[in-house]
Image: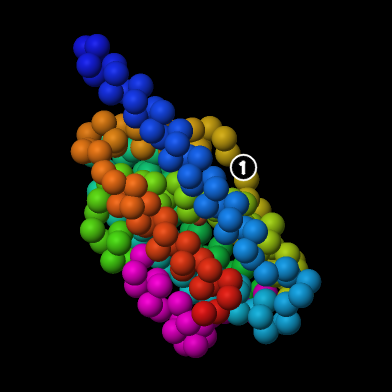
Amino acid sequence: MTPAAAGLVTSNESKTASIQAHIDRAIEDLLASLPDPGQLSAEERRGILARYTAVLEGNFIYWMTGAYISVGSDEARAKIMDNLREEVRDCHPGMMRRFALAAHAAPTDADAQAVYRNLMNVRLFIGRLSAVPTVVTMAFFEGFIQRFMPYLAELAQRQGSSEMEYTDVHGVCDVTHTQELFRALEAEMTLNQPMPEKEMFEGVELLRTLIQNIATGN
Ligand SMILES: [Fe+2]
């Protein structure tokens, strides 16, 4: 490796550390903004479960596939393919549906309509196939989901469900997985031109708005 290339790797490492810090803060803020499950009515709890299902069941694999198509490095491709393989092999959309059904929270037309616009914004963002912002967005989303699972499980329990496979599988804190994801991001940053922060975190902002929409219904 030339000294110039070595310098680039080091600067991308410190850049991904600052991106990770930004993502961690965004996750903390989002978790802190969630309504207290004990203060919600049964219909409000059902609504959160149903809107979450309306978004995740049919879109997560699409988003991950978009990420796979957009990246150029072997590290990022391998990481995302591991994720896709697990999603399909273990039928995560089916797991999601069973979770919603058991909590009597299968999404209705109105639930889908409530998240329509913000979901569309995330879909269109993924469709731009811009590698670095897409990988940043998926890192944010995976980090968020993991921390959100106890909350989602509590809502389902309060709705009388004991079907927790979905939240158990997705709530595992996998440090190695997170490290690999940020190494994949470093590799992508080496292949792509630097970009302004606003562009880098555009998908994170769109997804954050969508999750707030899931949590509040508006
Ligand atoms: Fe999944």
Q: Nearer the viewer, residue 46 or 36?
A: 36
Q: Residues within 10 Å of mark 1 (few under 14, many from 20)?
A: few
Residue at x 30% of width, y 62% of height = 125
Q: How was this image coloured?
A: rainbow
Residue stretch rendered in magenta on the structure: 103-122
Which of the image's four quarters has the N terminus? top left
Q: Which residue is farthest bottom? A: 110
Answer above or below: position of 14 versus 155: above
Residue 38 showing in the rendered view: yes
Residue 104 among magenta residues: yes
Q: In which image quadrant can residue 88 be found?
A: bottom left
Answer above or below: position of 211 versus 185: below
Give coordinates of residue 9: x percent, y percent: 32, 23
Q: In the visual, does 115 lie left or right of 154?
A: left
Give coordinates of residue 98: x percent, y percent: 59, 69
Q: In which image quadrant can residue 160 be found?
A: bottom right
Which residue has dot 1 on it? 173
Residue at x 56% of width, y 63% of height = 95
Residue at x 43% of width, y 40% of height = 19
Answer above or below: position of 177 versus 131: above
Residue at x 72% of width, y 82% of height = 42
- Secondary structure of the residue carrying numbered label 1: loop
Residue 86 showing in the rendered view: no
Q: In the visual, does 97 lie left or right of 153?
A: left
Give coordinates of residue 210: x percent, y percent: 46, 68
Residue 173 among magenta residues: no
Q: Mark 1 vs ligand 1: CB under 8 Å? A: no
| Amino acid type, residue under disc 1 in the picture | Cys
Give coordinates of residue 57: x percent, y percent: 47, 67
Number of labels in the image equals 1
Helix, strand or loop: magenta stretch: helix
